[in-house]
Amino acid sequence: MTFVSNTTNPRFIMVGGFLGAGKTTTISKLAQHFQSLGKRVVIVTNDQAADLVDTLLLRSQGFDVGEVAGSCFCCNFNELTRTIESLACDQRPDIILAEPVGSCTDLVATVIRPLEQVYDIKFDISPYGVIIKPSHGFKILGGSAGGFSPKAEYIFRKQLEESDFIIINRIDELTAEQTEKLISVLAAEYPGVPVVQMSAKTGAGFDTFCKLLDRPVEQQRRQMDVDYDVYAEGEAELGWLNCQVNISSSEPTPMDASLMTILTRLYRRFVDVTAEIAHVKLIAMCDQGHAVGNVVSNSGGPVLSLASDALSTQIHMAINARVAIDPDQLADIVREVLNDVSNAESLALDIAAIQFFRPGRPVPTHRITTG
């Protein structure tokens, strides 16, 4: 398949980062930015299983979104290109935004270089930016106690190592002293790599981020060695769950409150069993709108990131949980919380679909280590 002809190549922008870093919010803001410039934008999301909250959220915002589900971009490269082609069937996109799985690394060798050297449609590929959540930076790079295992931290470090630039997200939550400390740590660990201070939530630093995306890419992209045994073991330490829930009630129920009740109970249970949260995200939808809530660490509480103010007797909810816990125990906790909320709130909660597992060993379709 070929794109509708045009004199310029589509632009491919991939934004990486660990689970909970703020990739989806950043992708959404980028899509709005390029649409305001008159560009046709498509988005490709990625997850180890179907029913991704991010896909539902971006579609609810009106974006044209395709999803590569069941494996990461690198292990299903042909599905990535097929998804891009399907989004380009009727009208050629100007901008392709790609959000990889948050537990993946080595994406320059397994996604970017294959697009440049193997795929027969030419893209203008932007510099690869990787988003860092400050709490991860302080815990992993700053040597603070707690957090993920050394093998999971290995993935985080490798994500930053291969980046063309690093984005410190959530600067609205940091003091000036904390920001400078994190910049100093990054400069010591990754000398010469540009660092952007940004808040995807408030928009601070977004213009600087866009300017870095516009910069020419070095002819020789960064190369790095990856121990795929450590990489695989690090990914497998996370329990992964995607769940679809139908909620019904005899009287109209405040959707935001129901979402936050479930999210808060999940958060408390994970903290009680000392299971490190990488990301738990919920989206609730009804005829009046949609609401989103998330929690991205054990040290930070649940947040209603998008309120709906909706009342409804019929609500559909998707739950995505990435937690350092056995997946069977993860599923048990989710089921127990849903049952407890059903009894406490007099709601009928029906699990329409549930998947829970540990990610399998990454086996890239292509791995090209030279530019």
Image (tube, helix red, strand yellow):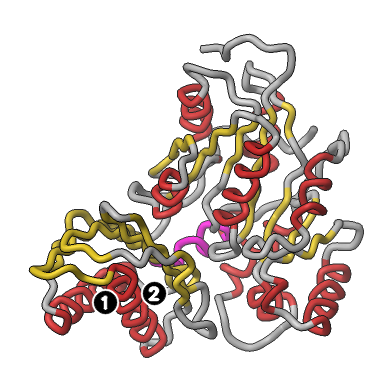
Q: Is residue 162 left or right of residue 106?
A: right
| CA separation in Å, label 2 and label 1 | 11 Å
Instruction: Using a 10 Å C-alpha cutoff, classify the residue at mark 1 as few (fewer than 14 neighbours), some (14 to 19) or many (20 or more).
Output: some
Q: Which mark is residue 333?
A: 1
Q: Is residue 96 visible?
A: yes
- Amino acid type at circle 2 is Ile
Residue 240 lies in quadrant: bottom left
Q: Is residue 82 left or right of residue 288?
A: right
Looking at the picture, how far across and down is residue 101, in whole percent?
52, 51
Q: Residue at x 68, y 12 (%)?
A: 6
Instruction: Using a 10 Å C-alpha cutoff, classify the residue at mark 2 as few (fewer than 14 neighbours), some (14 to 19) or many (20 or more).
Output: many
* Name of the residue lying farthest toward the top: 5
Residues 301 and 363: in front is 301
Assign the C terminus to one quadrant of the image.
Answer: top right
Q: In this view, does 118 lie above or below 250?
A: above
Q: Which mark is residue 11?
A: none
Q: Is residue 318 left or right of residue 212?
A: left
Q: Residue at x 48, y 26 (%)?
A: 87
Looking at the picture, how far across and down is residue 207, in whole percent?
79, 52
Residue 185 lies in quadrant: bottom right
Q: Which of marks 2 and 1 is in front?
A: 1
Q: Is residue 93 magenta?
A: no
Q: Residue at x 58, y 68 (%)?
A: 151
Q: In this view, does 280 lie above or below 214?
A: below
Q: What stretch is highlighted in magenta?
A: 230-241
Q: Which of marks 2 and 1 is nearer the N terminus?
A: 2
Q: Name the residue under label 2.
A: 325
Q: Are marks 2 and 1 in contact (CB under 8 Å)?
A: yes
Residues 78 and 339: in front is 339
